[in-house]
Amino acid sequence: MVFQRTISREVEVTGIGLHTGKKIRLKLRPAPADFGIQFNRVDIPGAPNIEALSKNVGATENNTSLGEGKNIVNTVEHLISVLYGMGINNILCEIDGPEVPIMDGSAASLIFLLKEAGIATLHKPKNFLVVLEKVRVEHEDKWAEITPASRLTIDSTIVFAHPKINTQRKTFDFTCESYLKHIGRARTFGFLKQVDYLKRRGLIKGASLDNAIVFDDYNVVNPEGLRFEDECIRHKILDTIGDVALLGHELVGKITTYKSGHHLHNLLCHKLLATPSAYEIIPASSLKEDTKSIFDLSQIVTVAQ
């Protein structure tokens, strides 16, 4: 049986917001079964919790935000991605500012934090969202679609006119173990020539070589170089998982994207949920054994029963 999960104990981290540049503290607290992933802005007295669901997505320019008005949390995609990557369904994320800290631009620091917290099994089965028919969204030459499959697979393509990136394509068959080894350490990236433009739009105020890969016209600016030769496409997969995890369930289906971003991923979630014939929600007991094994974490992190 694949049971719901939370963390064993409370943990916290402080870091800089990528876009706001503000120093922000994030505290993660255990939560009961069926609580889901919720954010609470502790710096706003009486602010209601924000559920990490696609229906609550706000702005999607250069990040994914949740909430509305002043009660918003920006740049949630890396945290949501790593929670999905570690099979954690229930957690309260208390935050004292408007943006999840960017850390090193990947999910690596968050993985370490969650391993320190430990994973607690909640003795209530998970439900899975199983895709039954193709759903597709398009914008200009960009598109994203989700189709039936026996497990979560992401087939992603990015295209950038840069000699260190060009066209990259990667197919990733999700397991918790593979996520931690091959996706979680991939950093967000950007281009030196876009810095002034993005800052004029009020973005990347906290960006630095410590939390992003930066490309000039020909090379990687970061002195340590890339962690993977194809680090950019791996990070795109990390972002994609974080965005589609806002469907609220583990997924059984194949996601294929071409030059997509947060906006298209959110449109895909909305269109899927608006097409009742395209999916069904089933209990873990109905899954095949090989699908259940995808979420085995016993050899990777401390699991508290």
Image: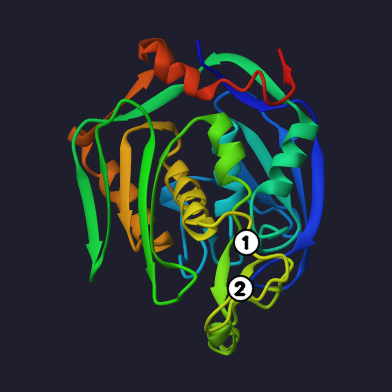
The amino acid pointed to by label 1 is Leu
Asked whether 247 or 258 is in front, the reply is 258
> Where in the figure is residue 113, as x and y percent of width and height?
76, 41
> Where in the figure is residue 281, as x and y percent of width and height?
33, 25
> Where in the figure is residue 37, as x and y percent of width and height?
58, 39
Residue 220 - label: 2
Residue at (36% x, 28% y) in the render: 151
Give the image quarter of residue 285.
top left
Give left or right: position of 26 versus 287.
right
Residue at (64% x, 67% y) in the render: 212
Give the image quarter of residue 102.
bottom right
Give left or right: position of 38 versus 109.
left
Which mark is first along the chain, 1 or 2?
2
Residue at (31% x, 38% y) in the render: 254
Question: How far apart are labels 2 and 1 at the CA level?
Answer: 8 Å
Residue 70 - label: none
- Residue 198 visible in this rendered orientation of the protein: no
> Where in the figure is residue 140, as x and y percent of width and height?
23, 71
Label 2 SS? loop
Asked whether 252 or 179 is in front, the reply is 179
Q: Quadrant of the C terminus?
A: top right
- Residue 299 visible in this rendered orientation of the protein: yes
The amino acid pointed to by label 2 is Val
Looking at the image, residue 253 lies above or below residue 258: above
Residue 226 - label: 1
Asked if marks 2 and 1 touch (Cβ < 8 Å), the reply is yes
Task: Characterize the local packing of mark 2: few (<14), some (14-19) or many (20 or more) Cα atoms within 10 angstroms.
Answer: some
